[in-house]
Image (cartoon, rainbow, N blue to C red):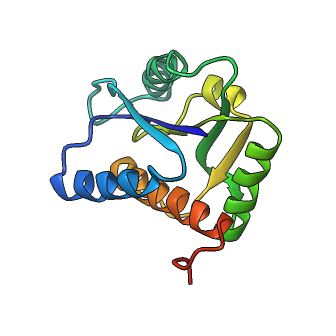
Amino acid sequence: MNITIVSVGKLKEKYLKMGIDEYVKRLGGYAKMDIIEVPDEKAPEQLSEAEMEIVKKKEGERILSKIGPDTYVIALAINGKMKTSEQMAADLESLMTYGKSKIAFVIGGSLGLHDDVLKRADEQQSFGKMTLPHQLMKLVLVEQVYRSFRIMKGEPYHK
């Protein structure tokens, strides 16, 4: 299985990079994971609704350019479906069973994801109603993917 995380913005914090690298290394025995970072759109702090839409559209185009037509896309969105770790594991296992060998998780920038990205997504998943920095979300996501594979294999870790 090939899992890709496509996210907006470059990860700068060393401690987050180290955590992500550790989980990507652990995942090596189960799946291939790639992390693709697309540049965030530079914008002033105060934006009108129209300007926000333009920023999200540009970031969305960058995201979509990194996703192949045969890729199953899971967009991380605050209004998406919330799952337990066991449900996430079962869903990933089901995707593998039914021939979905390429899965991309998408993490938007500080303004969220453009509607074009949400429309391209096969599903939307939420990790809760709290807003998390997208850099931190990347670490949480990689850990949960690793946890999912441990659960699928019946290996200790998730309790």
Q: Nearer the viewer, residue 153 or 36?
A: 153
Compared across the picture, whether 4 is left or right of 18 comes to right
Picture quarter with the C terminus = bottom right
The answer to whether 16 is drawn above or below residue 51 in the figure is below
Q: Nearer the viewer, residue 93 or 10?
A: 93
Q: Of all residues shown, which one is farthest toward the bottom?
A: 159
Question: Is residue 142 visible in the rendered structure shown here?
Answer: yes
What residue appears at the point 56 percent right and 22 percent down from the top-left corner?
67
User: Which quadrant of the view contains residue 115?
Assistant: top right
Compared across the picture, whether 53 is left or right of 73 comes to left
Q: Of all residues shown, which one is farthest toward the right?
A: 98
What residue appears at the point 26 percent right and 56 percent down from the top-left corner?
16
> Residue 96, image x and y in percent?
73, 44
> Residue 103, image x and y in percent?
62, 37
The answer to whether 154 is drawn above or below residue 89 in the figure is below
> Residue 68, image x and y in percent?
61, 18
